[in-house]
Image: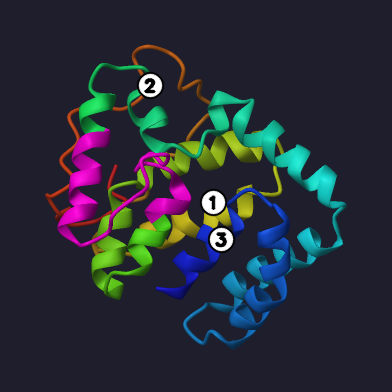
Amino acid sequence: MMIHRLVSFLLQYPDADLRRALPEIAIAIAGDDTLLPGERQTLAAFVEDLVAADPTQAEADYVATFDMVPEHSLHLTHHLLGEDKNRGPALIDLGEFYREYGLEISQRELPDYLPLILEFSSLLEAEEARLFLSRWTKVLRQLLANLEDASSPYAPLVKLVEMRSCMAGAGNAAPVAAATRSDPSLADGDFDPPVNWSALPVGGACAG
C-alpha cells in the first residue's frame, strides 16, 4: 500500500537524500487516489514543513525525538516488551517472518524498526497489510500517545499508521482504550509476550 511506503520514507532520518526526494514524494501524495482526504492533507502538510525547515535543525530535532527519548523509540518491540528477555527471540522471529515473504534486511537494521515494518507492509496485498499492521495497534497507540504528549510533529504520521492498523475487521471491532505516556525502558514493559508473528489476528483488530 502506497501510504505505508510514504510514511516509511517520512519517518526516516531527514538527511540530504530524503530532502532531495521530497518533491517526488509530494507528487506521489497528490496523485495517490487510495489516500483518504485527511491522510493526503496530513502527509502533504508534513512534507511542506520539512521542505521549509532548516536542514541542520530538522536533523537535530529528529535525533532529539527518536534517539534520545526511549518513549519515542521507533523500534516497536521496545514498547511491546521493554527490556524483557523475550525481546531478542521476538526480533529473530520477526526477521524470519520477513524472509518467508522474500524480504532480506540489512544486519544493521532491527526488524521492528517502524519504517521497515511499513516498507514490508507496503509489499503486501491491501487486506494482508491491514492484518499485519493490526498486530501492532496497541503499541502504535502507545507510541502515538508518547509523541503527542511531547507535541512532536511526527505524531500525525504515527496516527495515520495507527488508524490504518485499526481498519482490519473494523466492522466488529471495539475501540482500544486511550493510552497514557509510558516508559518502555522499564523491565516489565506494558504488553505480554510471547509474540506470534505468523498467526494472523482473528476478529476486530482494535478489540480491547
**Looking at the image, which residue is at 67% across and 69% down?**
21
Report x, y in % for residue 146: 58, 34
Q: Can you say which quadrant of the picture contains the N terminus?
A: bottom left
**Who is closer to the viewer here, 167 or 94?**
94
The amino acid type of the residue labelled 2 equals: Gly
Q: Secondary structure at mark 3?
A: helix
Q: Which mark is residue 158?
A: 1
User: Which residue is at 42% across, 39% downward?
Assistant: 108
Q: How far apart, in angstroms, are the residues tagged by discs 1 and 3?
A: 12 Å
Give amino acid for label 3.
Phe
Tags 1 and 2 touching, CB below 8 Å: no
Which residue does the numbered mark 2 point to in the structure image? 82
Can residue 166 be seen in this snapshot?
A: no
Q: Earlier in the sequence, mark 1 or mark 2?
A: 2
Relative height, residue 190 to residue 18 (above, below): above
Residue depth check, mark 2 versus mark 3: number of the one nearer the observer: 3
Q: Considering only order in the chain, which callout, 3 or 1, is on the residue closer to the N terminus?
A: 3
Q: Is residue 17 left or right of residue 120?
A: right
Of helix, strand and loop, which one carries label 1? helix
Residue identifier under label 3: 9
Could you classify mark 2 by the number of other residues whose Cα lies within 10 Å: few (under 14), some (14-19), or many (20 or more)?
A: many
Left-right relation of 112 to 102: right
In the depicted view, which residue is nearer to us: 72 or 180?
72
Asked whether residue 105 is drawn in magenta, I would say yes
Q: Is residue 145 magenta?
A: no
Tag 2 secondary structure = loop
Magenta stretch: give its range.
91-117
